[in-house]
Amino acid sequence: MKIRAALLTIPVTLAIAVASAGAAPITMMPLGATHHEQIAALGSTCAVPYVPAKVKAAFLDYPTIAEEMHAEGTAKVGISLSEDGKVSRAWPIQSTGNAILDRAALEAAKDGSYDPERSQCQAVGGDYQLEVNFSLDQ
């Protein structure tokens, strides 16, 4: 089952609120000290010199077998975004404790659609962490 998520923007941290019951939220934040907002505010010529990266669309597939096993957990996945918002790499940071859910979290990260961060009016790549929460209660 594919679940389309609706976007909810929060400063510096991004969250996806999934629109269907049984689905879980995905949150995104920069990895490391790569924030550009202070640099971007100096000498910029565009109206909005800094814009954080954001998730345009995310699809979380809660595997049927994991649901039947009543498997739940939170996975943390790292992603590298290029300047055009494409995922160039995804890797596990923290496991749910269930390999099926971990694979689903990696797939959701790879298949997501992203807008890259903009600093000094230019798109920039960067590394981010997605937190994927699998919960049967939602």
Image (cartoon, rainbow, N blue to C red):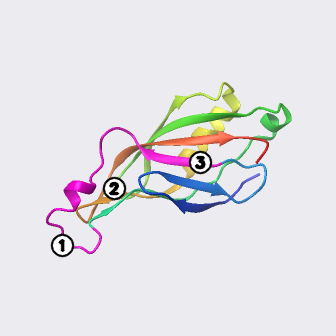
> SS class of the residue under badge 2?
loop
Q: Identify the residue under disc 3.
A: 26
Which residues fall within the magenta stretch?
Answer: 25-48
Residue for point 65% across, 41% down: 133
The image shows residue 118, relative to residue 74, as above or below, that is below
Name the side, left or right, on which 122 lies relative to 5. Answer: left
Query: Label 1 amino acid?
Result: Thr
Pick the front one: 37 or 110: 37
Name the side, left or right, on which 14 lies relative to 12. Answer: right
Residue for point 63% across, 56% down: 17
Mark-to-mark CA distance, 1 and 2:
19 Å
Decide whether the magenta segment is chiefly helix, strand or loop: loop
Q: Identify the residue under disc 2.
A: 83
- In the rendered structure, which disc, 1 or 2, sits on the residue that comes first in sequence? 1
Q: Identify the residue under disc 1.
A: 45
Pick the front one: 106 or 77: 77
Name the side, left or right, on which 86 lies relative to 47. Answer: right
Name the side, left or right, on which 25 lies relative to 126. Answer: right
Residue 27's x, y, as percent?
A: 54, 48
Q: Quadrant of residue 132?
A: top right
How dense is the environment of label 3, judged by Cα within 10 Å: few (below 14), some, or many (20 and up)?
Answer: many
Image marks 2 and 3: residues in contact by CB distance under 8 Å: no
> SS class of the residue under badge 1?
loop
Would you say residue 41 sits in the magenta stretch? Answer: yes
How dense is the environment of label 1, judged by Cα within 10 Å: few (below 14), some, or many (20 and up)?
Answer: few
Would you say residue 54 sits in the magenta stretch? Answer: no
Q: Which mark is nearer the camera, 2 or 3?
A: 3
- In the rendered structure, which disc, 2 or 3, sits on the residue that comes first in sequence? 3
| Mark seen at residue 125 | none
